[in-house]
Image (cartoon, grey):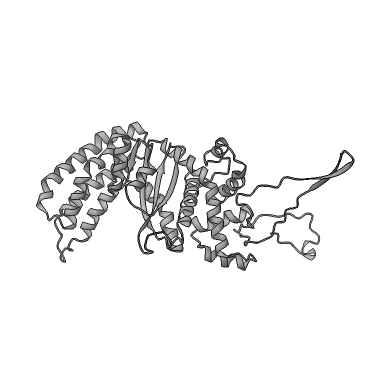
Amino acid sequence: MFAYLSEQEKSGAISTFFTKVREELDIIPAQVRVLEYMQEKAVFIEQDKDENKRIIISAEMPKHPVARAMGSINLMSFVIISKYADGLPLYRQEKILSRYGGELSRTTLANWVIASAKQLQPLINLLREHQQAGKVIMADETRIQVLKEPDRPVTSDKYMWVTLGGPPDKQSVLFEYDPSRSQAVPLRLLEGFSGYLQTDAYAGYSAACRENGITQLGCWDHARRKFKEAQKAQPKAKKGKTNQPSKADRVMSFINKLYMIERQIKGLSIEEKYQQRQERSIPVLNKLKTYLEDNQHKILKDGLTGKAMTYLSNQWEKLTVYCSNGELNISNILAENAIRPFVIGRKAWLFADTPKGARASAIHYSVIETAKANGLEPLEYYQHILAALPYAGTVDKVEALLPWNVELKKTTVN
């Protein structure tokens, strides 16, 4: 933007120049336009015996990931990112596009979402392989409502599972829809993996650990929450008086020391973390274990503190594994953070209509969150891979589309 002097104001000046006074952030509103593809054709005459044959050849058209779709790759990418990264349900996008001149039904948009997810499946397969090549996988699961799951009531619980892991420079976040919460799901998802698995205390993961020789790793966040709940339920001190520390308070003091150590050693190397935990965390854990053994029998098992102590006692072996390896974390917070975008998005779109839609959602969340985990802007990454996948006829070509292999602008994505 330029602000000009009038001719009268400039009259008599020996020169004029511009200086930048301020900057404003601007936005160009969305536009819906029609792209027309013109195909060049050439006509040849070929003599065949006594006849002349007319032969027509056509220029090769660019391939589209969803055959015969009326939406461009840019539009499909925009719809997918708007729903799964920005939480805009398809019925809202239908109205927004209509305002800008794009008359598209939400059914059409949903079909694009499902069809494009099928094209992304080879990418998901490779991401799963890379994830299992790492030493640590973190896992979690949450509910999803799917209306038309066969043989299941509409109100019954179905589940979206998430796994986070892989080599340090090739991290992936993978979602998987399954109507069941049985141990069969982690058995399938973790088949072939033999490192560390960090989860909450859900027993369904134990079978996969036994089957594959996986070392199960507990989560101190879950233990800490139970003692926090017990603290909140404690009666408040009378005016002018202070309550004596409760058993929940004493356990929390030990747990807080463990977390303080983790904050202090966060930037250290793997070996240094291991040494610090051996020297500082193990003594705290030993004192906590002794306190637990001395006091667990003194309180009601059905109370909040009793339940918290029972949980801590039952999970003790898994909860202390993190001290054996500097690569491990004290909590499963990274998996919980990974599943949070899905939980937030679910509040906006509420449910999936069909199992196909739920599985497509799992694929798109996987690609988006993995792109973000590797510093890529999701929209730009989607535009790149949807344009390239129709030409990726070999495993090597699909491998080249993984987030850590593409040359796109890196960004900090929350």
Q: In the picture provided, is 14 more to the left or to the right than 167?
A: right
Residue at 17% from the left image edge and 41% from the top image edge: 287
Q: In the picture provided, is 389 more to the left or to the right than 324?
A: right
From where the camera sits, is residue 377 visible? no
Residue at 66% from the left image edge and 55% from the top image edge: 20
* Most foreground residue, 129 or 278: 129
* Most foreground residue, 194 or 297: 194
Give percent across and percent down for residue 92: 53, 66
Quadrant housing residue 186:
top left
* Most foreground residue, 80 or 151: 151
Residue at 73% from the left image edge and 61% from the top image edge: 4
Quadrant housing residue 34:
bottom right
Give percent across and percent down for residue 112: 56, 56
Quadrant housing residue 55:
top right
Taking the view exactly as shown, the residue that stands out farthest to the front is 50
* Quarter of the picture holding the N terminus: bottom right
Give percent across and percent down for residue 109: 56, 60
Give percent across and percent down for residue 62: 68, 47
Q: Is residue 412 above or below residue 269?
A: below
